Structure formats: C-alpha cells, structure tokens
Image: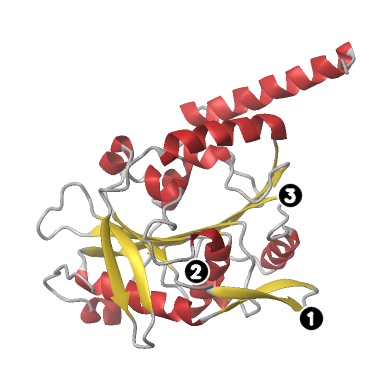
Amino acid sequence: MIMPVKTRTLKAFCIIIYTVVLWSFIEGKATIEPLSGYRNITIVKTLEDKIVKTLGTRMWKISIDQYTQLSFLGKDGITLKYRLLKPSKIMPGQEYPLVILLHGSNGIGNDNKGQMGFISKQFLLPHIQEKYPCYVAAIQFPSRSCVYTFSPKLKTRVSKPLQPMYTALELIDQLIKNLQTDLHRIYIAGFSMGGSTTWNILEEKSSFFAAAVIISGVPCNRSFTHLLHTPVWMIHGTLDPITPISSSRQLFKTLMKRNENDIRFWEISGLGHFPPSILFESDIFFEWLFDHSREITSVEIKNKPLIPFIITYF
C-alpha cells in the first residue's frame, strides 16, 4: 500500500527534525535544561529503533576485558560477581570518582557478563576514560534485587528491596574503603530492575551519592527523604510495557510539590523499555553525572583508610 504524498512528506519531515535534534546533541550544539526539571521528548519510533539497533551492534563489539572480574561474599552468604574498571592512570595520593552500575533483570546470573550493558561499555571509550577518569563497578545480582507490588495508598506500582541489594551495599562500602575513592563524587546509575534498586539504595543511603541516573525504574514505597540532597535524573519511555511510566510520573509530581533538590525527568514519547539512544550516542550522561559533587562529613573522612589499598575478593 502506497502512502499519500502528504503522509509521506510529513513522515519525512519528522525524521529530518529528529535527526537534526539528535545530531545537535551529539555535536554539543543543543541541550535540554527545562525550567521545571521536566521534559517531554517526542521521537520517531521507527528511526529510534533503527538507531538503537545500529548502536547496539556497535557497542556490543566493544571488549569488556579492561574490566577486572571479581566477586564479593557478603555477611548474608550471598556472593556477588562484579567487574571493576580502574582509571587508566592512577596517581599516588590522588582520589577518583566511583560509579556504581546496576543492571536490569535480564542480567541476573553468575557469569559476570550479563550485567555489562551499553553504559558500562561507554566507560571504555578512549575519550571518556581521558576526560572522566574514575572507578566503575558493574555489579551482577544472582537473583532479583527488588520486587514490584501495587500500593493502594499511592494507587501505583512500587518497588521493595530484596537481600541481594543489601549485599551490594556491603560491597559498595568495601570498595569505597579500599580504593582511592573521592568521597565527594560517588555516583550510581541503574536500568529497569537496577533503576528500581537504585531508588531503594538512595533511601538506605540518604545524602550518600553525589548524583543518580534512573532509567525505567519503579520508585520505592517510602519517604523519599533521600532526595532532599541527591540530584536525580529520571528517564522513562511512554510506551514502556515492563515498568510502566505511571509511577515515575506520580513521583515527579510529588517531588515538584515538595520542591526537592535537582530532580530532572525526561519523559520520552514513543520509547519502550530501553535507554534512549541519545544517552549512548553522546556524552550527555557523563556531562550531567560528573557535574555533581557532594559535601562529606568528618565521620566519613575518619572511617576512610589514610592509605588506600586494593584487594581482590574471592
């Protein structure tokens, strides 16, 4: 069936506009910085699917061998596999940011590979390593780190933590103590189950992280006092069938009423359960994340070893 000329012209026009906007992001000529923290980005889904497929093929070809394979045994008996990327050059006495990456449910396992998604591979790009030297810990959960339930009070879906999340908190504490970690710049990012787990970790570690990026996550059913001092960038597709956007919308409205600190929400029309291609076709993720830092307490400084050292967990 041949589309009418007007329909074909409109579709071609939309594709051209989307391509120009995307290229502007890539070239650094355009930014999205809404006054209220909210932004609705409309995409041409057929083009987005094509871009994601192309980028996916390119990113999956990147070797993850630069990440060291490690494992951590928690007090609860749960073993977490994880990969650690170190700065290409570590200077004595210098401290570096630590980034924690949490995967979706499709990465559950013990192969120490399933958790390695697009963002973890972006950290391997030479220009990223040069501009943003840091430690990156990509943690793999052996089972679900959170579950979803319906909250009659909130009238939406919420997430609740499971034991592997608490083991991950032990691991994070250990990494901070044993690496040359800059306590001002500890970051966390998660997708899907990992995004939902990030919400719960932020609740457990109030004012601990310098910033967080949550993609397609389900908020936790708690007080959100952690967001008083934690900048958060929420990203969610309107066509997400796995973790529907409704809970993110409701949370954002609540946070805006409370005038919470530095909350950014990208609602992406036409996107399903997947990170938007803009995140891994440009440096916007890194620019936003590393632009943040936090104040630390004297207690935190006291608890950190004066001479950092690196250990391997078995």
Amino acid marked by disc 1: Lys
Q: Position of residue 14 (x, y in %)?
A: 74, 24
Query: Which sits earlier in the primary sequence, circle 3 or circle 2?
Result: 2
**Label 2 with label 1: CB-CB less than 8 Å:** no
Query: Which dot marks residue 238?
Result: 3
Image mark for residue 229:
2
Res. 70 visible in picture: yes
Residue at 16% x, 57% y is 94
Outermost residue on the top side: it is: 5
Please tell me which of labels 2 and 1 falls first in the chain. Answer: 1
Q: Nearer the observer, disc 3 or disc 2?
A: 3
Identify the element where label 2 is drawn: loop
**Residue at 57% over, 77% down:** 225
Residue underneath mark 1: 153
Q: Secondary structure at mark 3?
A: loop
User: Counting residues from the N terminus, which is met first, the one under dot 3 or under dot 1?
Assistant: 1
Q: Residue at x 57, y 65 (%)?
A: 193
Kind of residue sitting beneath label 2: His
Q: Position of residue 125 (x, y in %)?
A: 33, 38
Q: Nearer the viewer, residue 173 or 241?
A: 241
Amino acid under label 3? Answer: Thr
As drawn, is 226 to the left or to the right of 149? left
